[in-house]
Image (tube, rainbow, N blue to C red):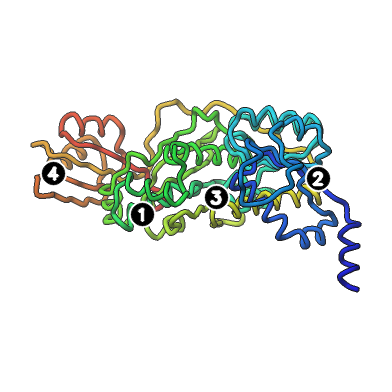
C-alpha cells in the first residue's frame, strides 16, 4: 500500500524538464546524480527532474550512462525549440557555447553552467542578459568543483567584508607539485603521470599555465568585490618551468610551493594574481595535497575560513550542478549584482612587496655565496635566510629568503654572476 501511495505521489509531482548541453564526464555525472537522488529531490522539491533533451556531438557514441535515443540530438535548435524549463551547460569552451546560452536566456530559460572560461570571458554580458530576461544564471560548479564556495560567499557577504580570497583552484597543478616534492621527480615525468591518470588533458596548457585558475579567480572577484580586472591584466604565471631542485630547496628552507590564486584590494583598486607561491609548511594551504582544491576567505567579522575538497571530476562537479538545479527550483528570481571590469589602479610594472624565496643556480667564477651576498647587501636587499648547496661539478645552488629584491637585481645576478634566478612570493610569515 505504501509503495502504491509513493508511486502516486511521485507521478502527481510537477515535472521539471531539463536540457543538457554536453554529455561528457560531467554531463554523465549529472545524470547519475539526478537518478541516484531522484527520490530525495522529488520529496524535498516537490518536483521530479527529467532530462528531456541532451545535445551531443555524436548520437551513436557508446556512453557510461544510457538515455533514450529520442532525448539525444546533435542539433541545438531542437533543444531551443523544446519545452525545457532549465538547461545545464557542461560542454565547455566559449564558441559556440556563448551563442547557445545567449539564445536560451533570451527565450526565458534558466541556465546552470560549470563553464568558468565562458563566465570569465562573457560573464558581464550574460549576467546583464539574464537580469533583463528575469532568469537565473547559476554557476556554482564553475569554481572549485564540489566545494560550495560561491554559496558560502553569498551568505557571508551579508554581514562580512571579505578582505581577501586565496586558494588552490586547480587540482591538476596541485597533484603535479605534490608528486614533484614527495617523489622528487621532474615536472615532465609527473605531467605524464597526471595525463595517464586523467587529471591532465592531452593539451595541459589551460591547467599548467594558470588559465584555469585565473578564470575561477575572476569569478570569485566579481562575487566578492563586484568587479574584476580584464583577464589580460591578471598577473598569471604557471608551473611548467619549475624544477625539482627549486621545490627541494624550498622544502629545506621550510616552505612548500603551490600555485596560489589571490584577489585582494590595493588602494582604490583590486589585484588578481595566479602564480607559484612559497608557503610555510605550517600554512593551511600548504597542507592541501594531491588533486584537492582549497579556498581561504578572510572576513572582517568571521576571520579566516578554509574550505577544501575535490575540485574537479565527474561527481564533485555534478554535485554542484544539481545543487544549483535544486536552488533554482526553490528560490524566486532575484536580479544578480551586475558584473563589472575596470583597469588596474597601479602601473603595469609589477611591484615587489614583502618577502620572497629566491632560487639561484650557476657555475660562473663570480657565483660564490660571499660575492652574491655582498652584492645584495650593497643593493639594499635584505637576506633573512640562506641555504647553500654545491654539487661535484662546482655548481652553486642557493635558496634565499629576501625582502626588497627587484627584477633589476635578478637581471644583474644573471648578467654579472652567471646565475639563473627564480623568485617566488611568500604567503605567510617569513
Asked if 95 appears above or below 353 in the picture, the reply is: above
- Seen at 81% across and 36% down, the residue is 82
- Seen at 50% across and 41% down, the residue is 213
> Counting residues from the N terminus, which is met first, the one under dot 3 or under dot 2?
2
Residue 17, numbered circle: 2
Secondary structure beneath dot 2 equals strand
Q: Position of residue 280 (x, y in %)?
A: 37, 55
> Counting residues from the N terminus, which is met first, the one under dot 3 or under dot 1?
1
Q: CA distance from mark 4 to mark 1?
A: 25 Å
Q: CA distance from mark 4 to mark 2?
A: 66 Å
Query: Is there a contact, CB below 8 Å, between mark 3 and mark 2?
Result: no
Q: CA distance from mark 3 to mark 1?
A: 18 Å
Asked if 406 appears above or below 155 in the picture, the reply is: above
Q: Which residue is mark 4?
A: 395
Query: Is there a contact, CB below 8 Å, between mark 4 and mark 3?
Result: no
Disc 3 crowd, CA 10 A, few/some/many (<14, 14-19, 20+): many
Amino acid at each position: 500500500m505504501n509503495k502504491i501511495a509513493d508511486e502516486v505521489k511521485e507521478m502527481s509531482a510537477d515535472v521539471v524538464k531539463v536540457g543538457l548541453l554536453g554529455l561528457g564526464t560531467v554531463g554523465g555525472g549529472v545524470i547519475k546524480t539526478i537518478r541516484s537522488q531522484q527520490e530525495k529531490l522529488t520529496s524535498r522539491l516537490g518536483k521530479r527532474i527529467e532530462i528531456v533533451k541532451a545535445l551531443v556531438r555524436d548520437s551513436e557514441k557508446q556512453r557510461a550512462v544510457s538515455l533514450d535515443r529520442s532525448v539525444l540530438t546533435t542539433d541545438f535548435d531542437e533543444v531551443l525549440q523544446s519545452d525545457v524549463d532549465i538547461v545545464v551547460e557542461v560542454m565547455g569552451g566559449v564558441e559556440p557555447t556563448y551563442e547557445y546560452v545567449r539564445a536560451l536566456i533570451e527565450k526565458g530559460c534558466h541556465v546552470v553552467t560549470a563553464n568558468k572560461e565562458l563566465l570569465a570571458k562573457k560573464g558581464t554580458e550574460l549576467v546583464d542578459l539574464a537580469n533583463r530576461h528575469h532568469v537565473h544564471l547559476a554557476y556554482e560548479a564553475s569554481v572549485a568543483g564540489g566545494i560550495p564556495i560561491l554559496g558560502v560567499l553569498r551568505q557571508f557577504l551579508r554581514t562580512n567584508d571579505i578582505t581577501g580570497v586565496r586558494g588552490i583552484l586547480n587540482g591538476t597543478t596541485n597533484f603535479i607539485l605534490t608528486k614533484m616534492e614527495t617523489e622528487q621527480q621532474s615536472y615532465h615525468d609527473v605531467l605524464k603521470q597526471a595525463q595517464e591518470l586523467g587529471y591532465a588533458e592531452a593539451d595541459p596548457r589551460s591547467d599548467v599555465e594558470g588559465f584555469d585558475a585565473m578564470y575561477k579567480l575572476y569569478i570569485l572577484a566579481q562575487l566578492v568585490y563586484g568587479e574584476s580586472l580584464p583577464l589580460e591584466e591578471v598577473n598569471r604565471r604557471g608551473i611548467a618551468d619549475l624544477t625539482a631542485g627549486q621545490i627541494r630547496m624550498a622544502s629545506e628552507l621550510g616552505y612548500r610551493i603551490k600555485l596560489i590564486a589571490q584577489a585582494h584590494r590595493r588602494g582604490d583598486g583590486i589585484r588578481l594574481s595566479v602564480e607559484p607561491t612559497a608557503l610555510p609548511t605550517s600554512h593551511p594551504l600548504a597542507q592541501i595535497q594531491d588533486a584537492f582544491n582549497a579556498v581561504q576567505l578572510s572576513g572582517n567579522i568571521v576571520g579566516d575560513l578554509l574550505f577544501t575538497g575535490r575540485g574537479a571530476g565527474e561527481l564533485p562537479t555534478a554535485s554542484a550542478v544539481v545543487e544549483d538545479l535544486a536552488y533554482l527550483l526553490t528560490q524566486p528570481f532575484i536580479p544578480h549584482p551586475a558584473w563589472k571590469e575596470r583597469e588596474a589602479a597601479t602601473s603595469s610594472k609589477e611591484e615587489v612587496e614583502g618577502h620572497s624565496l629566491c632560487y639561484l643556480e650557476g657555475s660562473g667564477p663570480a657565483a660564490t655565496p660571499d660575492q652574491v651576498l655582498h652584492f645584495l647587501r650593497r643593493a639594499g636587499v635584505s637576506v633573512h635566510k640562506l641555504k647553500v648547496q654545491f654539487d661535484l661539478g662546482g655548481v652553486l645552488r642557493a635558496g634565499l629568503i629576501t625582502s626588497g629584491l627587484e627584477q633589476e637585481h635578478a637581471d644583474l645576478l644573471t648578467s654579472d654572476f652567471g646565475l639563473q634566478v627564480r623568485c617566488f612570493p611568500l604567503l605567510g610569515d617569513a
